[in-house]
Every structure is written in structure tokens, then in C-alpha cells.
Amino acid sequence: MALNDKLLTVATGVVLAVGGAAASLLLGDHGTQGYQPNLTVAANLSAPQVPTITDIRPTAMVPDAPVRMAAGVLPSKPEQPEADTGQMIFAAVEPAARRVPSAVRSDVITIAVQDGAPQLATPADFSDIVLTRSIANVPAPQVSGLTNGLSVTMTDFKDSIRIPQSPKVSCALDLRATPIFGARVKLKLKAPCHPNVTATIRHGGLQFKEKLDGAGQLELKVPVFAEYSRFDVELSDGTQSSVGAYIAGLSSLERVGISWKGANDTFLHAFQNGAGMGEAGHIWRLNPSDFAMSRMEGGGYLAQLGDTALSEPQLAQVYTLPLRMTAGQQIVSFAVETLRGETACGAMMKIQTARHQPNAKAGANKLSLRLPECGAKQTSLLLKNALKDMKVARK
């Protein structure tokens, strides 16, 4: 054998011996236990996965351990470790989040994996999942037409639809007269369709105006002049209503009243038993007394009717004298006074009067007078003989 051939043979034997020793040291020698290494690694030939730095983690620090490279992989030049440090072995591990499609698992090769190591997790196999229904398989609603042949009546919904009905409001006037003590009535007016309107009230030859509130209501106490009393009410829009009431007790009193139209001040003065102007027995607007005081102390009282705040007011005043069951005589004299107004000066003024006496019919009358001229010194007009005196004698 030539010298070159001998050298080649010796070199080959050395390589094989060194390789066998390295393999024995790496895989371990378990003696007579019969343990044989069995390594398996799956790799995708068609699309090899190149591990990144995040996919690599140290598995062991083995000092002076030999390194075995997989067949067909060229080793890169390893860095030379320092004298007293060991070599770090890295193993490429597939990331847990990565899923390898089952279709490419057939192309595998076998490399060394230690027998008995925990099995690597494999991607879930969805081949056993059965699709029971898809949105694409849901039948679309069948609509034959939106308007063709559509016929709907309210009777089709009579059992399912309840349309709330607002209560109907009656616009008719509700006028009531309730008798109360003192030969008076409590007059109530309800006109819900006529809020804040003006009502003209007529009774016994007198008339006056009152204003309804925001709900179209009015309530007031009115002295009456007849046993069967009638009240006529007319609203500013022409709506009218009437009511009657039977009144007892008129035989125990006498009554006199006046009413007028206009903003100028007018007064009914009653001088009881010779009282002078401003004295205790002088009953008028500034000293009207009332029904209760009249019953306790005697004498008469004055009721004022009408709304003075209206732009064109109509007002009334009524004096009532109860007849006391005592001996003696009572005499009441009257006077009617009217003041000249700034716009009514020199104009004609009409005053309506009404009177009730026991066992006599109610009487009514009209007075006409001319107001003092504008600029004249006289500012008021006093009529002393416009109404007859009351003379009441009891035994």
C-alpha cells in the first residue's frame, strides 16, 4: 500500500473513533440496561421554520460538552468561550402560539429526540367539528310586495290597539243658585271654555260685571229682591244662561240697591236713625258693616258687587236692614252721590235702582243725572231724594 493510501486510512479511522466517542459521550452510556437513544424532530421541508431569538431559550449549561449538529446543516463558526466558562447549548423550540397546519405534517424527517421526553403540544385538529348551520343557509324572508294587494282597516286592530280618548269638555254654562242665610244666594258659575272672560249678571233690576278666573269659574254671594229670584248671566262673547231659586226670609227685612255703569265713583249712603256723615250709624262703602254684625248689634249692612278693575266696570251696592223684633221705630234715609270723573265730566249718567219691602213686589227704577262740567269747582253730585226713606215701627 502506498504511503498516501496508508495516511488516508489512518485519518479515516481517527475520525470514526473520535466521532464514536463524541456520540457516546453526548447520548450517554447506560451499560447493561439496554437503553438506546431515540431522537425525533419534525420539520417542514416545504417551508422551513427559522427560529428567531424569541424562540430560543437555554436548556442546559454543560461545561466542555461536545456539540452534535444535525446532518445536512453546516455549522457556523462558534464563538470561543473563555478558559473557565462552560459552553451553553441552545435548542430551537417552536413558539406556543404558532400552529402548524395538519396538511403539511406528512413531510417530516427524523432526527434525534430523547425517548421518554414529554410530548410536544400539537395544533388542535378541527376536522371532527361539524358545521350544523351557516348564516348563508338561513332562508331570506319572503316578501311578495309592500303595497300590492295590501288592505288594512281599523277593525283589523280593534282588539290590539287602544287609542286613548281625551274626555270631552262641555262648553255649556253651569250656573247654580243656592239659598243661604240673610235672604241671599250663593251664585256659582262654571264655564270651562271661557277662562278670564267678563260676565254680566242681572237680577231684580240691577246689573253688574264680574270676571271669571283662569278655570272659567265664578262664585259670589248676592242679595235677592224677590222670593222667587231669577239670575241671568251673559258672557262677553254672547253666551247666556239663567237660573232661578226660591228664597225664604224676605219678610223679615227691607232692601234697597243701586247699579251704574262707568269708572266714576258712586256711593249709596244710608243714615240710620238720624246719623250724620261719618258717624257710626252712617253705612256706606267706607263703613259697610256686614251680615253677622248686623244680627248682633242691629242696624243694616252694605254689599258691594262688581269688579272695579275692569276697563268698563258695572258696579252695584245693596243696603239691607233686618227687622228686629223689638219695640220702637227705625228710620233710615238715603242719598246717592257720584263723583265727576276725568273723562266723564259733563256727561249724562244713568243709575238703576231696586227695592224690596215686606208684602210688596220688588220695584225697580232709573235715575238720570248730569255730572258736573270739567273745570267747575263742584266735583260731586249728591241726590238726597232719589230713594224713599225706610220707616220700620214695631210694637
Image: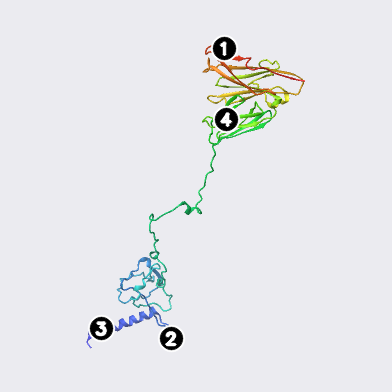
Which amino acid, by three-letter code, is at mark 2? Thr
The quarter of the picture where residue 122 lies is bottom left
The quarter of the picture where residue 101 lies is bottom left
Q: Which of marks 2 and 3 is in front?
A: 2
Tag 2–tag 3 contact (CB < 8 Å):
no
Q: Nearer the viewer, residue 61 or 272?
A: 272
Q: Mark 1 points at which residue?
A: 378
Question: Dot 2, crowdedness within 10 Å: few (<14), some or many (≥20)?
Answer: few
Question: Where does the image place residue 371, in percent across and percent down from the top left?
Answer: 55, 15
Question: Where does the image place residue 80, in percent across and percent down from the top left?
Answer: 33, 70
Tell me the quadrant of the picture where the C terminus can be found: top right
Q: How far apart are marks 1 and 4 (CA)?
A: 38 Å
Q: Which of marks 1 and 3 is in front?
A: 1
Q: Name the residue under label 2.
A: 32
Which amino acid, by three-letter code, is at mark 4? Val
Nearest to N terminus: mark 1 or mark 2: 2
Q: Name the residue under label 3.
A: 8
Q: Which of 253 and 78 is in front in this view?
A: 253
Q: How far apart are marks 1 and 2 (CA)?
A: 155 Å
Q: Which of marks 3 and 4 is in front?
A: 4
Instruction: Determine which of the numbered discs, if any, sits on residue 233 in the image.
Output: 4
Which amino acid, by three-letter code, is at mark 1? Gln
Question: Where does the image place residue 28, in percent across and percent down from the top left?
Answer: 40, 80
Tell me the quadrant of the picture where the N terminus can be found: bottom left
Question: Dot 4, crowdedness within 10 Å: few (<14), some or many (≥20)?
Answer: many
173 relative to 101 in the view: left or right? right
Q: Which of marks 1 and 4 is in front?
A: 4
Nearest to N terminus: mark 1 or mark 3: 3
Nearest to N terminus: mark 1 or mark 4: 4
